[in-house]
Each structure stands twice: as C-alpha cells, then as structure tokens.
Amino acid sequence: MRCARGSFSRGYLLFPYLEKYNITGPPKVMWGVDDEIRGLIKEAKTLALHYAPGKKEELLGKVREALGKVSDMIFLLSAVE
C-alpha cells in the first residue's frame, strides 16, 4: 500500500483547493479510482487470507485487476508530473 499513500497525501493537499474553486470533476474521479483500488486490494486480501484452491482464479483475477489499476494510476501521475 506504499504507492497508494503517496496519491492519498497528494489528494489531501490538492483536492480541497480544487473543490474550493468549484473544480469538482478531477477530485471525484481520483477519489473514485482510489476507492476502487482499495476495494480490490481488500477483496484480494480476504481471498488470500481464506485461501481455497477452488478460489485461485478469483484471487489471481482480483490481484491482476488491482495491479492494473495501480499501474494505470502511476502512469497517469507520472505523465502529470
């Protein structure tokens, strides 16, 4: 979750100013993506903690989906900086 912390701290610093000036689109999208990633990680963690061989593909799917979204976010953030 280390990479997620950086985006959260940026969000806490930047988003209040955007919202103050009525720029609400980017914060809503970014918070929504962050929430989605946290949800995927939580689901993958739960599946891993209660691992059953029959759930292997479901676990791998959640991990792949979370990694894909994190990778996309890193790419977008690096393009902005």
Image (spheres, grey):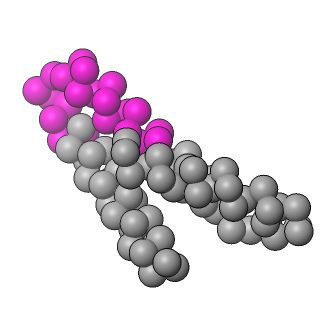
Q: How many marks?
A: 0
Q: Does residue 28 appear in the picture of this structure?
A: no
Q: Position of residue 39 (x, y in %)?
A: 47, 39
Q: Position of residue 81 (x, y in %)?
A: 49, 78
Q: Position of residue 10 (x, y in %)?
A: 59, 57
Q: Identify which residue is drawn at 37% across, 45% down.
A: 2
- Going by the picture, which residue comes out furthest to the left? 53
Magenta residues span: 38-58
> Compared to 11, does 63 lie above or below?
above
The secondary structure making up most of the magenta span is helix
Front residue of 52/2: it is: 2
Would residue 71 be counted in the magenta stretch? no
Left or right: residue 14 versus residue 53 is: right
Q: Identify which residue is drawn at 19% across, 22% down.
A: 51
Q: Does residue 66 appear in the picture of this structure?
A: yes
Would residue 39 be counted in the magenta stretch? yes
Left or right: residue 56 versus residue 2 is: left
Q: Identify which residue is drawn at 78% across, 56% down.
A: 16
- Going by the picture, which residue comes out furthest to the right? 21
- Going by the picture, which residue comes out furthest to the top? 50
Q: Position of residue 20 (x, y in %)?
A: 88, 61
| Among the 4 quarters of the image, the one containing residue 30 | bottom right
Q: Identify which residue is drawn at 57% across, 50% down.
A: 9
| Among the 4 quarters of the image, the one containing residue 60 | top left
Left or right: residue 25 versus residue 47 is: right
Front residue of 49/21: it is: 21
| Among the 4 quarters of the image, the one containing residue 1 | top left
